[in-house]
Amino acid sequence: MADNNKMSREEAGRKGGETTSKNHDKEFYQEIGQKGGEATSKNHDKEFYQEIGEKGGNARNND
């Protein structure tokens, strides 16, 4: 814990994520991933996907 006996954001996020993973199954994560993908596609155009695709390809090529 942080010096002032309060949890850091990192610690709070880790604790919340662990609790969420204990309370939900694989289907939960698939559903929220699907919703996120649909929301992203509504908010971004073809150029956005081309750009992130290039970034992903570049990262793989640098391995």
Image: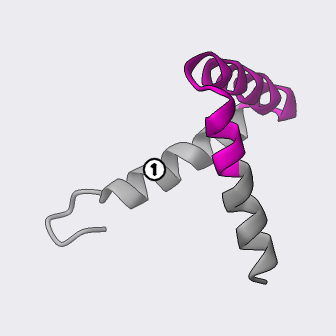
Residue at 78%, 63% (x, y): give it.
57
In the image, the segment drawn in magenta is 24-52
Note whether 12 is above or below 27 in the view shown. Answer: below
Judge by depth and name the residue closer to the eye, 30 or 8.
Answer: 30
Q: Secondary structure at mark 1?
A: helix
Judge by depth and name the residue closer to the eye, 43 or 47.
Answer: 47
Q: Which residue is mark 1?
A: 13
Q: Pick out the residue farthest to the front.
A: 47
Residue at 40%, 59% (x, y): give it.
10
Note whether 32 is above or below 62 in the view shown. Answer: above
Left or right of 8? Residue 47 is: right
Residue at 74%, 82% (x, y): give it.
62
Left or right of 25? Residue 6 is: left
Left or right of 30? Residue 47 is: left
Note whether 35 is above or below 49 in the view shown. Answer: above
Quarter of the image that includes the C terminus: bottom right
Left or right of 23? Residue 17 is: left
Q: Which image quadrant for residue 30?
A: top right
Residue at 73%, 60% (x, y): give it.
56
Quarter of the image that includes the N terminus: bottom left
x then y, percent, for residue 48: 61, 37
x then y, percent, for residue 46: 69, 30
x then y, percent, for residue 21: 69, 42
Look at label 1 and name its amino acid: Gly
Judge by depth and name the residue closer to the eye, 11 or 39.
Answer: 39
Q: Which image quadrant for residue 24?
A: top right
